[in-house]
Image (tube, rainbow, N blue to C red):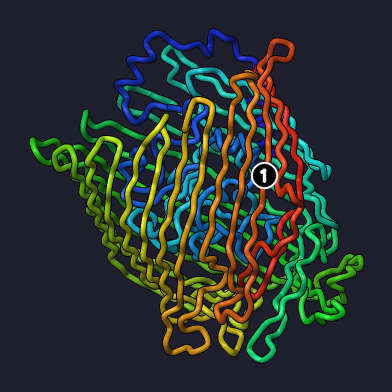
Amino acid sequence: MQFRLTLMASAVMFAFATPQAAAQDPSQEKTDKELGTITVTAERAGSFKSNAVQVGTFRDLAPLDVPQTSNVITREVLDAQAATTLYGALRNTAGVTRSQLSGSTYDNIAIRGILVENRGNYRLNGSLPIINLIDVPLENKERVEVLKGASSLYYGFVPPSGIVNFVTKRAGKDPVTNFALSANEHGAASIHADIGRRFGEQQQMGARINLVGGREDIGIDNYSGDRMLASAAFDLRATRELSFKLDLEHYRKNVSEQAAIALPAAVNGRITLPPVPDATRNLAGEWQKYDANATNILFRTDYLLNDRWAVLFEAGKARTGRDRNFSQFQNYNLATGQGTLRIFFNRDQEWENENYRTEVTGHVPGTWLTHDLTFGYTGNNRDQVSRASGTVDVAQNLYNPIAIAPQSPTAPSVASPSAIKDRGWYLSDRVSIGDKWQAMVGVRGSRYESVTPTARYEADDVSPSVSLMYKPLSNVSVYASYIEGVEESGQAPANRANGGELLPPAVSEQKEIGVKAEVAQGVLLQAAYFDIKRPSTTVDAANRFVLNGLAQYRGIELAASGEITKQLSVIGSALFLDAEQLNAANATTFGRTPENTPKRTASLFAEYRLASVPGLALSGGVFYVGDRPVNNENLATLGGYSTVSLGARYLTKVAGKRTTLQAVMDNVTDKSYWSTAGNGFVGVGAPRTLKVTAKMEF
């Protein structure tokens, strides 16, 4: 509470600061040039393309210089789509699907068929591993980045699905005081304040405050709740050489959780799925709340040793806690719909990540060869306490749901703690060879330790990374790369016989070749072929979650983002994927597609700003996910689906203030469809939703 009150008080102070305090100092331009990469910058208005990425060893590089597939969803794209959820942002990138959960509480995501691990693959400002077990707010984010594939060189033990990076808003040269009201047709409503200022004679201090609060409703039965966000991003240029950044965010979400639908039992080697339920149906009770909160703190300091060498130090902590009343509908009759709703009670679950990083970067010029060197060390501690209080079974019907009376835990809470220590040093060298060639060589040495009440694993590994890039033109790059990654093999879910068990670490390999180009008014085009081999997992005959040989993911990925003309902006992507399990010892899964992995995904979103009606922009998007097997045995398949979004926003003046009025409708055709599979569950997509927003700039 004290944290929230402090932020609110700061917001009021910044909102009513005198214009002189926020004005641009004449010497600012010179200071910014001197500080180089420390300068706080922002995307130009209307840009669907980012000019730099802030993830991994590629921090501050232009996308053309990144020898790996990367996608950036800029603030302008998020605003144009009125996106406030993780999946709402990532649906603009190829190969992204929901996994296991339907998204009523938070988004469990897979990329290219590989799960994005919720404790290690989500990062704040390229560094702090935040815990994706509660919806990560987007209102205080400048953009969302996705670095596809293996990323162990910089991030240690993480799956090769990719890194999702949230970049926070910071104070720019112009003061910001924005207030927005949003609502949807189902009764949800929220208010958002976004306030930014710079202070000091040379504008050397900056602060950006974001506050959000409101009621939640996504249009499904038996659903209610609320959420809030309080965040602050501070920066200080103490001297020309020394700068500091501090990010604080606290958010909470307390909503009803939609019941998961378990797969029916197989008959003669096939699973027959029920008809897709109505998108508004919820088999759980409204009282079955998912009450979660998260606090993330990240500190960074940069020191310029001289014109060529710099030192960086970062330290952060992420904590998430939740109470959960999860339920799964199981053992049901396909003809009558009669079955059992099993309710799991979890109380006082906690996750904590502590992360430290120190890094030295340097530029070594030469006549023919130029080196950009990075030496670093990182330490990450992940502690978890899971608590379960038994289960309760009640009767329910898939086709004619009944109200579920409130239930209580049946047993005392049993704690199951676990801890992970991930240490690593890394070295990378980006070598410029003349004007057209670049080579990047990197290596990481990792030390990993995982401890649970029943098991302990230790591992040492060295992960190499190498790439070669050729730029025949200044706006075109062609590259090839080879990366080895190391990852946790996973934790057995609660509904498995070995629930909570951590599987031993494993090594993955990735090869990629690609081409990138900037065309038109600034459209970034990307095409890449990738080949990933990684250990796979399955559920054995004893209902245990175990390792299951290798899986291979090969595919072609295409992406485009930016401005085709001054009036037309686009962001689009497509993935053509061939994934199979290479576990010859397991005849039931050998050669089959990993669960929930579509062979095709695609998206296209465009916004057109009408020259004939100044201030008016119309938008539309199509998002496609192809057929996916429901499990590793491929005993049933979910049909592919497409959803359509339409929107309009109008910039005008109200009482002399810049005001944006916006309406966005998702799933325009109100289609009911299977949106997700995994871990023995299937889930239903969200119903049609109309959202309206009014934002005023002071």
How many tags in the picture? Answer: 1
Foreground residue, 540 or 20? 540
Disc 1 marks which residue? Answer: 645
Q: Amino acid at mark 1?
A: Ser
Q: Position of residue 467 (x, y in %)?
A: 25, 54
Query: As drawn, is 136 to the left or to the right of 444?
Result: right
The residue sitting at 56% across, 24% down in the picture is 196
Q: Position of residue 91 (x, y in %)?
A: 57, 50
Give the quadrant of the N terminus: top right
Q: Position of residue 56 (x, y in %)?
A: 37, 48
Give the quadrant of the C terminus: top right
The crowd level at tag 1 (other Cα within 10 Å; few <14, some 14-19, many 20+) is many
Numbered disc 1: secondary structure: strand
Foreground residue, 249 or 176? 176
Q: Is residue 609 visible?
A: yes
Foreground residue, 2 or 693? 693
Q: Residue furthest left?
A: 367
- Residue 277 found in image quarter: bottom right
The residue sitting at 54% across, 54% down in the picture is 602
Query: As drawn, is 235 to the left or to the right of 296?
Result: left
Up/down of 74 relative to 226, above or below: above
Up/down of 451 relative to 591, above or below: above
Query: As drawn, is 621 to the left or to the right of 578?
Result: right
Q: Is residue 191 visible?
A: no
The residue sitting at 51% across, 66% down in the picture is 599
Q: Position of residue 95 (x, y in %)?
A: 51, 58
- Residue 425 found in image quarter: bottom left
Q: Residue furthest front?
A: 612
